[in-house]
Image (spheres, rainbow, N blue to C red):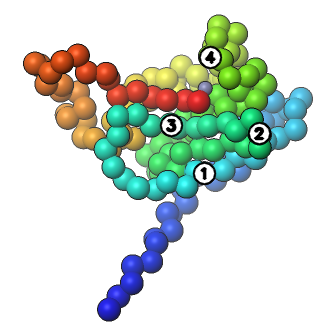
């Protein structure tokens, strides 16, 4: 008989350091928020993925644990942290003002470009499968990047 123990994910990114840098650079006027990896580590195909979330009751930020991988650039994780910090400062709405603040993140454009090219990795799909959609399918809702 053997028991499979949960294998701890090899931590790749040091989230506290990434969060501390985002706080220091952009949000030093407010106290730092707690930023943690979320729980879910199952690998499955998804239609969407919630990369980060901000809980306004606990004022904690959660980052999806799938981002803790060597093929995810640090600036992308920081862009998610930055986005969630903005919810702390500006509220829940993704309005014009929110987007204007989002663009203040130094690698905003790079982060957007990176996710545009690499979302398939996070959704657990192969690139070919992701790019080729069935021609006769009813208008499919494209897989979405969800930042909350
Ligand atoms: Zn959001």
Eyeballing the image, is 59 above or below 97? below
One can see residue 77 in this view: yes
The image position of residue 62, as x and y in percent, is 63, 44
Q: Give the CA separation, mark 4 to mark 3.
A: 15 Å
Mark 3 vs mark 2: which is more N-terminal? Answer: 3
Callout 1: few (<14), some (14-19), or many (20+) C-alpha neighbours within 10 Å?
some
Mark 4 vs mark 3: which is more N-terminal? Answer: 3
Residue 94 got which mark? 4
On whether ligand 1 comes within 8 Å of the CB at mark 3, the answer is: no
Callout 3: few (<14), some (14-19), or many (20+) C-alpha neighbours within 10 Å?
few
On whether ligand 1 comes within 8 Å of the CB at mark 1, the answer is: no
Eyeballing the image, is 109 above or below 40? above
The image position of residue 54, as x and y in percent, is 67, 36
SS assignment at label 4: loop
Residue 37 got which mark? 1
Residue bearing the label numbered 3: 50
Q: Nearer the viewer, residue 73 or 145?
A: 145
User: For residue 28, what is the image quadrant?
Assistant: top right
Q: Give the CA separation, mark 2 to mark 1.
A: 18 Å
Residue bearing the label numbered 2: 57
State the residue at coordinates (39%, 41%): 122
SS assignment at label 3: strand
State the residue at coordinates (20%, 35%): 129
């Amino acid at each position: 008989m053997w028991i499979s123990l949960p294998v701890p994910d090899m931590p790749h990114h040091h989230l506290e350091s990434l969060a501390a840098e985002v706080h220091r650079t952009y949000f030093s006027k407010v106290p730092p928020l707690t930023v943690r990896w979320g729980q879910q580590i199952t690998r499955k195909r998804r239609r969407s993925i919630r990369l980060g979330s901000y809980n306004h009751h606990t004022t904690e930020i959660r980052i999806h644990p799938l981002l803790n991988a060597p093929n995810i650039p640090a600036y992308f994780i920081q862009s998610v942290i930055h986005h969630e910090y903005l919810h702390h400062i500006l509220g829940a709405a993704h309005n014009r003002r929110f987007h204007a603040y989002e663009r203040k993140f130094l690698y905003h454009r790079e982060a957007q470009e990176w996710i545009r090219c690499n979302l398939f990795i996070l959704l657990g799909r192969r690139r070919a499968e992701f790019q080729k959609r069935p021609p006769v399918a009813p208008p499919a809702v494209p897989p979405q990047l969800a930042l909350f």
